[in-house]
């Protein structure tokens, strides 16, 4: 077997960093040792793991789809959790790691002269084209991956073996980072109108709802239970968001079982109770987020929508968002467009239009905007539902909350929002994102669409969000990766039964720990445009919606902007903070010095022009003597360095004061000048390379996520 | 004709509507020889609203009762509505604007056809060779291109990038033009990269602006219109061709000759972009102005003909074509992909667009250097560059993120990487505040840092006194 120590070591280091278990090859005890012991011991262990030749294939080619670069030759490894491709090129040895849970489809293509192509499509939109020399090997890899990518038991998922070296206490704290109880308190609850209900304790009424729910005070348990029997999957109306400014609220539920004529007194009372909980308005909106046709078709199955005649004081409204099947096909079509090999502009735009993807995104945003406006401008409460109230309803409620409340536009607030509207309210993560092998018709990019809606808003309001694009991308990644327990299962109840919190780690804690990476340097919390509800233009135009290449083509680095404004500004900010701290420290020292100098000058009767030479202040550690010419030069160059100097800037006052008060010899020499220049050259120049050079050296940033844990 | 004859009603009460996002302005409207003024009265915050008459692209008047409405569509794509009291006043003012917006009518000559001209060491541009139907040859021209290769490193190859299709180039022989025959120019390889020009380019621009003005359209409708108007396709083609030329020079060490028919339109897009890609000095504030001056103004891009009308004119386009705008859009795409590498910002590109179409400065006047000499433009007008280089303009025009980048900028020309230039095409339809707030913040972060950096050495200097 041909492998070099170098390759082994680098592969191993990554492995060690990721701390993943490989139950297929290693015993847990061995692995624990692996984390603690010396590298050479680990090397040995790794060796055993590699010896199993069926798990590696040599001379595999990884095809770069975008650039015309030659395919990279390397070795493919299959582990229990990852597919790893290590390039042979001795200087880079670039590694590509793919989690099995990220694999969406595997396609074996017709064998060619060079080998057997294998196409791996990932849920995070990575596309890997491998060419394996032997057809037999290719088939083996294919079969293994098909099995590995479709786990049948939760216990097979990565999060149950993922160990980021945290002790029990740290893990528990991680799970406590996001606390929905606190969140409802922040909204101002409970209050005179809303109370915490224990009606769903032990998930007695609705097994896909959380145990803790807020309902109107006037809604008795009898009303709630009655209403729940009149709603699909017993998902009765419950509070999603309370707008404390005007008591209006957003509630959510599933569709009523109204059929063509059925009524339910308790359900009607429930909606009354919601209306009464908002003294500022004499009606509520009932928003059905389905196309009218779909809702009407549901009536034949004994489901349907509210009849305005039966419910007093409701305004009923359809907002046509398509169902999960349409969305799944739409994404599929859009990804086909992304995969086109150098398409023409009109191929791309026609394809994008044909997919309908941006139309769906706009529909979701429009629905969110409608609800946010109803709440903030009309002061009316809104009840939102679709069919089961766990897909479109979650999308629309969370978009509306995000528009209304600046808290949800912060890093932590955004995590809370997903925890509230998606995780706790029983969005079926397992079914929608195919964590376990299941019905492919259940899979649909529902939360992906929500994440894109947030990105579209970020593009329109660059100062309104505390987090950046990378945060969204990493959340999307974790939803599919199954590296953490947050996004497992279909409901809170299932998660509790699986004891997720005891057996896995929380991705929120992980994201929070790395929050410096996710900050938006342009965030202005105090700006008039970003305080309170976001001010959207009266008519949201189609052309504000853009194709998100940062998400759907994110692994094609060549297509992305080569330099990151966010990273640059963060580096600048960080540096000026450091400088300020340094400046403060130096300022303190300066004050001390000036005190000493003042004492000395009183003693001295020398001419002012040469005090430093006479005062004996220049000591041996000062190697370069300053000259007077530099002084004037420094003063001249000063204003141009800080074009917008203002009196409010204390740092500046400090220097001006010190120029006036201290001796005239005080100046910067050229060495210090160039020192400043050096500092200003720090630019995190990620992309300042020609295209042929970049991307080959740095590991994919998303891979890094797995390894930094 | 004197200005005074065109101004029958000098003043009227009027209300100005400036689009969905800006509040209306009421006040006294006044027509002067070059400007339209609206004075809202002493208490108002913006004390004067001013519009250069030359920037009016089309004018529409309507009267109802004793009021009139004038709709002005400007060359910078703004749409303004003036509600004026008095029917006669409305009609007179409309007539004045109509008459005055054309300004001094220059007499246009078609640009003098010039033969090959050397612009840079290895990047050359020219017009087409005058091969004609008889397949003429020109010994001097062949010698010139031979000399170019000989002057370059030994064994260097040359590429001729013809910005027309092979078919069009061949057809040009009928009218006395053509393209270099392979046999006559050994060492040179000809590549055809057809770029859109002339009327189709103008129509593409008009359709795009039309689509951008339709606020009610559905998402699908918008995407198909964006595809249908083909503007982004032209951007993609222009950028790709420039990258090809630049790549030939940088990677192959080859000599590149770029030409189309006249060498004053698409040729300039390619040569100027190629320089921006390769040459870091052309990406500075001064370098970029030099580039525009050299590669566009002095190279004889016929600005008067090309920019006589913008996208709103009802007149049938004759010589109009947004070639210069296409160049600016490509530069914007480059700046979006390399946000730290251009010293100038979007503001600079917008300013150049505005001034190319209507300007109080003389820089973009006339169609060639010869015309400018005849009209004494240099002595009788001010230069745009001196206007742009004033200190107060810098915050708008400069890119605060600029870090000199010595490397070539190789942009991606895949459709996923190219975007509609919203800052230009949607400048007057989307609310400006969010992007302004972001721009302010960027400046604040950068200047904060400069302040701390600027103040540090003085303190450490005093420390050295110890």
Image (tube, coloured by chain):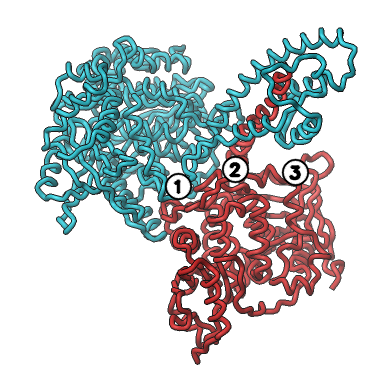
In the depicted structure, whether residue A602 falls above or below residue B265:
above
Inter-mark Cα distance, 1 to 2 = 26 Å
Q: Which residue is disc 2 drawn over?
A: B402
Residue at 79%, 58% in the rendered image: B35
Residue at image point 31% right, 46% down: A331
| Residue A699 location (% of width, % of height) | 36, 37
Can residue B371 be seen by looking at this rendering? Answer: yes
Q: Residues within 10 Å of mark 1 (few under 14, many from 20)?
A: some
- Total marks shown come to 3
Q: Residues within 10 Å of mark 2 (few under 14, many from 20)?
A: some
- Residues at marks 3 and 2, CA–CA distance in whole angstroms: 19 Å
Q: Position of residue B428 (x, y in %)?
A: 61, 50
Q: Chain of mark 2?
A: B
User: Mark 3 vs mark 1: same chain?
Assistant: no
State the image coordinates of residue A323 (x, y, percent, origin top left).
Answer: 29, 41
Q: Can you tell which chain is drawn cyan?
A: A
Closer to viewer: mark 3 or mark 1? 3
What is the chain letter for disc 3? Answer: B
The disc placed on residue B392 is: 3
Q: On the picture, is A202 further left or further right than A516?
A: left
Could you tell me which secondary element the residue under label 1 belongs to? Answer: loop
What secondary structure is found at the residue carrying circle 2?
loop
Give the camera-side residue of A377 and A650.
A650
Decide if residue A339 is on the left or right side of residue B281.
left
What is the chain letter for disc 1? A
Q: Colour of chain B?
A: red
Q: Could you say which is closer to the camera, residue A132 or residue B138?
A: B138
Mark 1 = which residue? Answer: A546
């Amino acid at each position: 077997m041909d492998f070099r120590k170098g390759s082994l070591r680098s592969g191993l280091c990554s492995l060690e960093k990721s701390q993943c278990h490989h139950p297929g090859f290693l015993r847990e005890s061995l692995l624990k040792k692996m984390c603690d012991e010396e590298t050479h011991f680990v090397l040995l262990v790794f060796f055993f793991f590699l010896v199993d030749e069926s798990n590696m294939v040599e001379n595999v080619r990884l095809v770069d789809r975008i650039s015309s670069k030659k395919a990279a030759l390397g070795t493919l490894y299959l582990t229990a959790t990852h597919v790893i491709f290590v390039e042979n090129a001795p200087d880079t040895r670039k590694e590509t790691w793919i989690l099995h849970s990220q694999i969406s489809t595997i396609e074996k293509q017709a064998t060619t002269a060079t080998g057997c192509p294998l196409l791996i499509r990932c849920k995070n939109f990575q596309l890997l084209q491998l060419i394996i020399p032997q057809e037999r090997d290719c088939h083996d890899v294919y079969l293994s991956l098909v099995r590995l990518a479709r786990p049948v038991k939760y216990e097979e998922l990565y999060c149950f073996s993922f160990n980021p070296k945290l002790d029990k206490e740290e893990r528990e704290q991680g799970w406590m980072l996001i606390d929905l109880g606190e969140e409802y308190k922040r909204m101002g609850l409970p209050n005179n109108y809303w109370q915490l209900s224990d009606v769903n304790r032990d998930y007695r009424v609705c097994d896909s709802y959380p145990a803790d729910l807020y309902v109107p005070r006037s809604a008795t348990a009898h009303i709630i239970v009655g209403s729940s029997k009149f709603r699909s999957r017993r998902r009765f109306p419950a509070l999603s968001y309370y707008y404390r400014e005007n008591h209006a609220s957003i509630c959510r539920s599933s569709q009523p079982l109204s059929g063509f004529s059925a009524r339910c007194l308790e359900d009607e009372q429930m909606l009354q109770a919601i209306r009464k909980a908002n003294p500022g308005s004499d009606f509520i909106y009932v928003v059905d987020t389905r196309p009218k046709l779909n809702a009407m078709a549901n009536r034949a199955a004994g489901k349907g929508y509210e009849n305005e005649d039966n419910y007093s004081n409701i305004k009923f409204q359809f907002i046509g968002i398509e169902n999960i099947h349409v969305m799944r096909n739409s994404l599929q079509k859009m990804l086909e467009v992304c995969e086109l090999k150098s398409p023409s502009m009109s191929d791309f735009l026609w394809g994008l239009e044909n997919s309908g993807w941006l139309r769906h995104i706009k529909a979701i945003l429009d629905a969110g905007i409608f609800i946010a406006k109803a709440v903030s401008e009309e002061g009316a409460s809104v009840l939102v539902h679709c069919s089961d109230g766990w897909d479109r309803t979650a999308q629309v409620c969370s978009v509306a909350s995000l528009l209304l409340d600046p808290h949800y536009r912060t890093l932590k607030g955004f995590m809370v929002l997903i925890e509230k509207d998606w995780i706790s309210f029983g969005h079926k993560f397992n079914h929608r994102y195919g964590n376990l092998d299941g019905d492919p018709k259940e899979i649909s990019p529902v939360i992906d669409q929500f994440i894109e809606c947030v990105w579209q808003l970020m593009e329109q309001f660059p100062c309104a969000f505390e987090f950046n694009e990378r945060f969204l991308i990493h959340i999307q990644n974790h939803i599919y990766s199954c590296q953490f327990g947050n996004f497992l299962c279909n409901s809170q109840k299932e998660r509790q039964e699986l004891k997720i919190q005891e057996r896995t780690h929380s991705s929120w804690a992980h994201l929070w720990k790395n929050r410096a990476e996710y900050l938006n340097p342009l965030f202005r919390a105090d700006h008039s445009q970003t305080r309170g509800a976001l001010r959207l233009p009266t008519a949201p135009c189609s052309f504000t919606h853009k194709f998100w290449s940062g998400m759907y083509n994110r692994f094609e680095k060549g297509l992305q902007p080569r330099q990151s404004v966010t990273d640059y500004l963060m580096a600048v900010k960080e540096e000026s903070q450091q400088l300020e701290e340094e400046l403060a420290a130096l300022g303190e020292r300066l004050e001390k010095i000036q005190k000493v100098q003042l004492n000395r000058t009183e003693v001295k009767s020398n001419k002012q022009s040469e005090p430093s030479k006479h005062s004996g202040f220049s000591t041996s550690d000062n190697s370069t003597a300053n000259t007077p010419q530099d002084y004037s030069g420094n003063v001249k160059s000063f204003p141009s360095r800080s074009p917008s100097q203002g009196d409010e800037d204390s740092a500046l006052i400090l220097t001006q004061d010190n120029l006036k008060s201290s001796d005239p010899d005080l100046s910067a020499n050229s060495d210090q000048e160039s020192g400043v220049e050096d500092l200003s050259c720090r630019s995190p120049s990620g992309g300042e390379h020609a295209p042929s050079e970049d991307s080959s050296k740095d590991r994919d940033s998303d891979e890094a996520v797995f390894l930094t844990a | 004709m004197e200005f005074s004859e065109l101004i029958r009603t000098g003043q009227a009460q009027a209300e100005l509507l400036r689009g969905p996002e800006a509040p209306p302005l009421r006040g006294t409207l006044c027509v002067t020889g070059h400007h339209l003024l609206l004075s809202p009265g002493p208490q108002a915050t913006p004390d004067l609203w001013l519009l250069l008459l030359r920037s009016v692209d089309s004018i529409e008047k309507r009267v109802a009762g004793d009021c009139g409405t004038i709709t002005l569509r400007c060359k910078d794509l703004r749409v303004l509505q003036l509600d004026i009291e008095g029917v006669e006043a409305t009609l007179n003012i409309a007539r004045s604007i109509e008459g005055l917006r054309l300004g001094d009518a220059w007499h246009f000559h078609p640009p003098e056809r010039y033969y090959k001209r050397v612009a840079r060491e290895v990047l050359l541009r020219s017009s087409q060779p005058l091969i004609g139907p008889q397949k003429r040859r020109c010994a001097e021209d062949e010698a010139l291109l031979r000399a170019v290769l000989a002057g370059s490193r030994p064994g260097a190859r040359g590429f001729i990038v013809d910005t027309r299709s092979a078919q069009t180039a061949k057809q040009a022989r009928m009218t006395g033009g053509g393209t270099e025959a392979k046999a006559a120019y050994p060492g040179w390889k000809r590549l055809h990269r057809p770029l859109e020009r002339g009327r189709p380019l103008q129509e593409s621009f008009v359709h795009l602006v039309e689509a951008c003005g339709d606020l009610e359209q559905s998402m699908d409708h918008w995407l198909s219109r964006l595809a249908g108007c083909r503007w982004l396709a032209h951007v993609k083609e222009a950028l790709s061709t420039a990258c090809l030329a630049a790549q030939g020079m940088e990677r192959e060490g080859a000599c590149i000759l770029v030409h189309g028919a006249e060498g004053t339109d698409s040729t300039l897009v390619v040569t100027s972009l190629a320089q921006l890609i390769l040459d870091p000095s052309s990406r500075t504030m001064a370098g970029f102005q030099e580039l525009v001056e050299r590669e566009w103004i002095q190279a004889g891009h016929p600005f008067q003909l090309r920019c006589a009308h913008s996208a709103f004119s009802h007149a049938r386009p004759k010589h109009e074509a947004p070639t210069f705008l296409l160049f600016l859009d490509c530069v914007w795409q480059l700046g979006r992909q390399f946000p730290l590498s251009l010293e100038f910002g979007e503001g600079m590109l917008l300013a150049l667009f505005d001034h190319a179409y209507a300007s109080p400065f003389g820089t973009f006047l006339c169609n060639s250097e010869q015309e400018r000499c005849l009209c004494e433009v240099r002595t009788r007008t001010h230069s745009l560059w001196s206007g742009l280089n004033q200190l107060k303009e810098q915050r708008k025009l400069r890119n605060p993120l600029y870090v000199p980048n010595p490397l070539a900028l190789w942009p991606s020309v895949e459709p996923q990487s190219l975007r509609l230039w919203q800052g230009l095409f949607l400048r007057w339809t989307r609310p400006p505040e969010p992007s302004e707030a972001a721009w302010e913040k960027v400046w604040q972060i950068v200047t904060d840092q400069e302040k701390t950096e600027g103040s540090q050495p003085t303190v450490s200097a005093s420390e050295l006194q110890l």
